[in-house]
Image: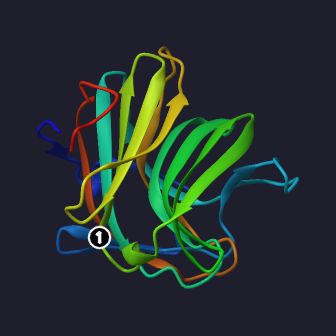
Amino acid sequence: MDEQTVIDWTDAAWLNLPLNAEPDGEALLVTTRHGGDFWRTTAYGFVHDDGHALLTAFPPGSAVEVGFVADLDELYDQAGLMVRVDAETWIKAGVELSDGQPQLGAVVTHGRSDWSMAPVPDWAGRRVTVRASRTGDAVTVRARCEDEPWRMVRLAPLAPDATAAAGPFCCSPQREGLTVRFTGFTTGPADRALHDDG
């Protein structure tokens, strides 16, 4: 991956303020409000657009990375990276507690949400990085745990002319008080190839 530029936490804007957000050295500790989530309609029949996301501009030809450590204790606790155009057009990708263990997954929403996931039990409580890279009509999402190789998570459509923002997100649909330590927030050029060799 190319050189990344650090984004200062204060240079991004909150979508839905969390219960608390405070610096911890170079990191940012974010504590969730009760019941926030991002989801539209599919299978559950409800719309939630009240999770917490700290967003910066995400123009074509760029990539954003978010690093975090989270102890996910309750069902649907989640943290990661969000790409957002508007309330009906967005992507969230990261780690979520479901089926009793951490899952690496993504939700892609164009009017309605879809969800894919895969178990990553060995990622619990460790540093995870999620990367979204925007080229042409697509966003490529990758993730890794600590210094392990990048994994492809999702290739999702995004209109080339869409005005989008991206950055860290977290929410806890079943409770209040999930605290996530976001360890990094960077931007840089988009990936040169769809399939990364590591």
Furthest-right residue in this view: 45
Task: Answer with the quarter of the image where residue 36 lies.
Answer: bottom right
Q: Is residue 54 left or right of residue 194?
A: right
* Residue 132 shows in this picture: yes
From the top left corner, tell me how far across and down residue 40 is, in percent. Answer: 76, 47
Comparing 70 with 104, the one in front is: 104
Question: Is the N terminus in the top left, top right, bottom left or bottom right quadrant?
Answer: top left
Identify which residue, 129 or 104, lies in the foreground: 104
Q: Is residue 25 left or right of residue 190?
A: left
Q: Amino acid at mark 1?
A: Arg
Q: Residue at x 71, y 44 (%)?
A: 113
Residue occupied by mark 1: 127
**x and y, in percent, of residue 196 in the image:** 27, 36
Residue name at image x 25 percent, y 54 percent: 149
Element at badge 1? loop
**Can residue 169 be seen in this snapshot?**
no
Q: How is the image coloured?
A: rainbow
Quarter of the view holding residue 134 = top left
Label 1 CA crowd tier, 10 Å (few <14, some 14–19, many 20+): some
- The residue under the point 37% across, 46% down is 142
Give the image location of residue 69, x and y in percent.
Answer: 34, 73
- Quadrant including the C terminus: top left
Q: Looking at the picture, how far across and down is residue 147, in whole percent?
A: 19, 62
Task: Look at the picture and state if 7 lies above or below 136.
Answer: below
